[in-house]
Image (cartoon, grey):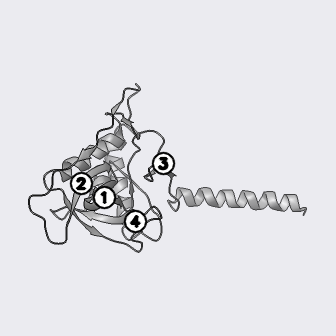
Amino acid sequence: MHTGTKLALLGAVVAVLGFWAWGQGWFPFRLRSDGIYSGTNAPANAPATDATIERPKLYLPAPQRQRSGYRAVQRVIDGDTLELEGEERVRLIGVDTDELGEDRVQPAGAGWKATLYVFELLEPDAQVRLVFDDERKDKYGRTLAYVYLPGGEMLNELLLQQGWARTMKIAPNTKHAKRFTELEKQAKAAGLGRWTGE
């Protein structure tokens, strides 16, 4: 077999394995310029029109009483990324919400709806407890965590249950991957959130 043929065959095998690994969630889907992982180029369920609004910065009121073991959330960046006190960014493990524009958003798009869903959950008592998996930080310096609300609910799970996120499995942080996959299937079957009309 000629060297050129061997290289072409090797390239084809690498491409097939790469697409398979990407499909299994082993690679991030896409990285925006602000370092936020995103899974799609356009929000699901976005209206046919290009109508957008200036992207609001969703700052939260400080909690009235700080709970032991909890951290105050200063703002919601998007559906799967929060900013805590001290400007620490937290990326929710195992979930991926639809992309938002950096400067403008589509109000009817799934990405903005997911972001508002998180904001509304946090607004009454904007503090969370973080639980970590094998890796505590990503290469962009963001904290990777399972995020728990004051009532004990895991925010990562709520996003999947309500259909506002897809699963995103990135090893080695896969402690809840099986449950997350099941929650996504249930929301999709029920046509909730971003799955409405699909």
Q: Amino acid at mark 2?
A: Gln
**Mark 3 and mark 4 in contact (Cβ < 8 Å)?**
no
Q: Residue visible at 42% across and 64% down?
A: 141
Q: Is residue 185 visible?
A: yes
For the residues carrying marks 2 and 4, which lies nearer the camera in this image?
2
Q: Which sits in the foreground, 13 or 89?
A: 89
Q: Amino acid at mark 3?
A: Ser
Q: Residues within 10 Å of mark 2 (few under 14, many from 20)?
A: many
Does label 2 or label 1 sit earlier along the sequence?
A: 2
In three-dimensional space, the C-alpha distance between marks 2 and 1, rounded to whole angstroms, equals 8 Å
Q: Amino acid at mark 4?
A: Ala
Pointer 2: what residue?
74
Pointer 4: what residue?
177
In three-dimensional space, the C-alpha distance between marks 1 and 3, rounded to whole angstroms, equals 18 Å
Quarter holding the C terminus is: top left
Q: Residue furthest right?
A: 2
